Each structure stands twice: as C-alpha cells, then as structure tokens.
C-alpha cells in the first residue's frame, strides 16, 4: 500500500504528541499512519460509521509508550 505524503507535524488530523526525539517522532508517525490505514479496512468505508479520532489517538499514544517501555527493557 502506498502512503500519501503527509504534513509531518500532523497525523490523523492531530499534532504529534510531545515527541522528545527524532526516533520518538518517527515511531508516533508510523503508528498513527498505520491506525489511519487500519480505519479504512472496511468493505465499505463510506458507510462504516463515525470514526472516533480522539479514541484512536489514545490507542496510538498508549502503543507508543508500550513500545518504548518494551525497548527500554530489552
């Protein structure tokens, strides 16, 4: 799947949340792009209902923290 060029300060319509390093920024960007792509995995995305971007943002931020904690403990 080809990824569209996006504004690097925004992902899924929300600003990157407190990225403390280039790696943190890239990790957040990849996770949020993936969440956005996954949100379109419906037979008919147009009639899938309302997308709750606030909840998706919480999921993405939790995943970022979980990955960072996991990497710290390796």
Image (tube, rainbow, N blue to C red):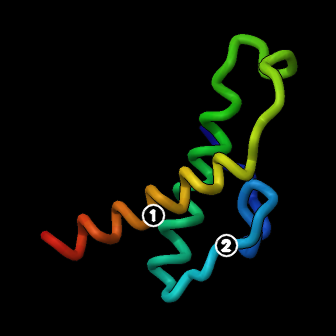
Q: Quadrant of the N terminus?
A: top right
Q: How many marks?
A: 2
Q: Height in image: 35 above or below 62? A: above
Residues packed near mark 2 inside 10 Å, few (<14), some (14 to 19) or many (20 plus): some
Q: Quadrant of residue 14?
A: bottom right
In the rendered structure, the answer to whether residue 65 lies left or right of residue 19 reads left
CA gap between label 2 and label 1 equals: 11 Å
- Which percent across, then down, holds residue 13? 81, 59
In the rendered structure, the answer to whether residue 42 lies left or right of residue 66 reads right
Q: Residue 35 has which mark?
A: none
- Which percent across, then down, holds residue 3? 66, 48
Label 2 SS: loop
In the rendered structure, the answer to whether residue 74 lies left or right of residue 21 reads left
The foreground one among 64 and 27 is 64
Q: Identify the residue under disc 1.
A: 64
- Which percent across, then down, holds residue 74? 13, 70
Looking at the image, the residue that sits furthest to the top is 43
Q: Height in image: 67 above or below 35? A: below
Label 1 SS: helix
Q: Identify the residue under disc 2.
A: 16
Residue at the image point whose x is 85% and y is 16% from the top = 47
Residue at the image point whose x is 73% and y is 52% from the top = 54
The foreground one among 51 and 8 is 51
């Amino acid at each position: 799947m080809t990824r569209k060029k996006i504004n690097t300060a925004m992902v899924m319509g929300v600003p990157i949340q407190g990225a403390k390093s280039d790696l943190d920024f890239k990790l957040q960007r990849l996770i949020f792009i993936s969440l956005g792509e996954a949100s379109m995995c419906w037979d008919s995305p147009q009639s899938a209902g309302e997308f709750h971007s606030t909840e998706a943002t919480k999921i993405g931020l939790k995943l970022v923290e979980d990955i960072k904690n996991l990497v710290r403990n390796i």
